Amino acid sequence: MLAIYIFLFSMVLIAIIVDIRVRTSLGIEKKRGWYKHVNQTHKWAEIILIIGSFTIVAILGFVYRIDLPHYIFWILGALYAFRTFVEWKYNQKSKQYILTFINSILMFVLFIGLLLLSYPKEMTHFHTGHIYTENGMISESVELEIDGVWKRNLIYGEIFEGTVKMLDKEFITFRYDPSKKESLVERLLGKKTYYTIIDINSGDRGELWILHGSQAIAGTFNTKIEEKENYVIFAGPADTLEEAKELVNQIAK
């Protein structure tokens, strides 16, 4: 996620520098207040363009589950491109169309850059871990398999979509109100992410914490053992019970 925020900051800085240099060299006046459209046709055409673009992006987001925040820059790029044409045709003397054209290019570059940096990454990790209960009923080594896709989102940070397997359990991950379990900084920088997990077969529910890049995981779930409800804890990589408990304290607290 840090690469995305560095890219965003760099693009904002470039946009500010370009704006100042172009205005100074071409003598383009900086207008105050809201943008003034060339005419009413121009105004309503932009409104239709914005509504149409948001509708298309929303449909694509629903059907193909794309990350919508990135596409805001595509919409802005299209808006500036249309505005460039109108300003060039009806208001060439102000030379504003040159700056608007540059802004359109910057928006499209920003969109493509974010799209590439946030492209989902498939991953499968295996950890030798430990699973145990506080009452000592369970305490054994276990292989933890993390299989799924990592996604990067401007608003939600790094998100893992997939499964965690151990013994006869296969848990699906869900993001339910993670703000209660992780700080804003942890979420945006992807240092640690929190998930609700549900076993596909038994319906057992629990919680899961994943460190950046799946370096380590820790979690808990409730399950019935000998007709009694038990609170099961797991963590990896951990070769011993002590290492597992220490990892749980580091990640899940």
Image: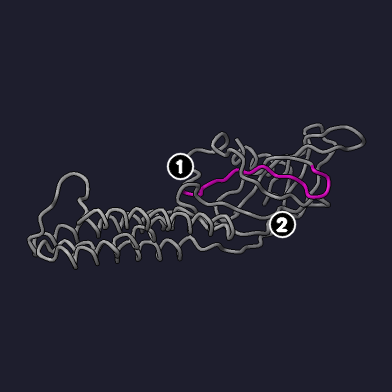
Instruction: Give how far across and how far down residue 228 sits, in percent.
Output: 88, 32
- Please give the range of residues in magenta: 189-203
Image position of 67 (left or right of 92): right
Colouring rule applied to residues: one colour
196 falls in the magenta region: yes
Instruction: Give how far across and how far down residue 221 sits, in percent.
Output: 75, 39
215 falls in the magenta region: no
Q: In which image quadrant can residue 162 be found?
A: bottom right
Type of amino acid under label 2: Glu
Image position of 37 (left or right of 10): left
Image position of 159 (left or right of 243): left
Tell me the residue that label 2 is attached to. Answer: 145
Q: Earlier in the sequence, mark 1 or mark 2?
A: 2
Pick whichever, 123 or 55, lies toward us: 55
Mark 1 → mark 2, Cα distance in angstroms: 27 Å
Q: Name the residue at 46% across, 48% down.
A: 189
Instruction: Give how far across and how far down residue 216 sits, in percent.
Output: 62, 51
Type of amino acid under label 1: Val
Tell me the residue that label 1 is attached to. Answer: 185
Badge 2 marks a residue whose secondary structure is strand
Pick whichever, 142 or 51, lies toward us: 51
Classed neighbour count for the residue bearing mark 1: other residues with Cα under 10 Å, few (<14), some (14–19), many (≥20): few
Instruction: Give how far across and how far down residue 129 sits, in percent.
Output: 72, 50
Q: Name the residue at 69% across, 59% down.
A: 126
Name above or below for residue 20 compared with residue 101: above
Badge 1 marks a residue whose secondary structure is helix
Pick whichever, 191 or 4, lies toward us: 4
Q: In which image quadrant can residue 214 be found?
A: bottom right
Pointers 1 and 2 in contact (CB under 8 A)? no
Name above or below for residue 26 compared with residue 43: below
Q: Quadrant of the C terminus?
A: top right
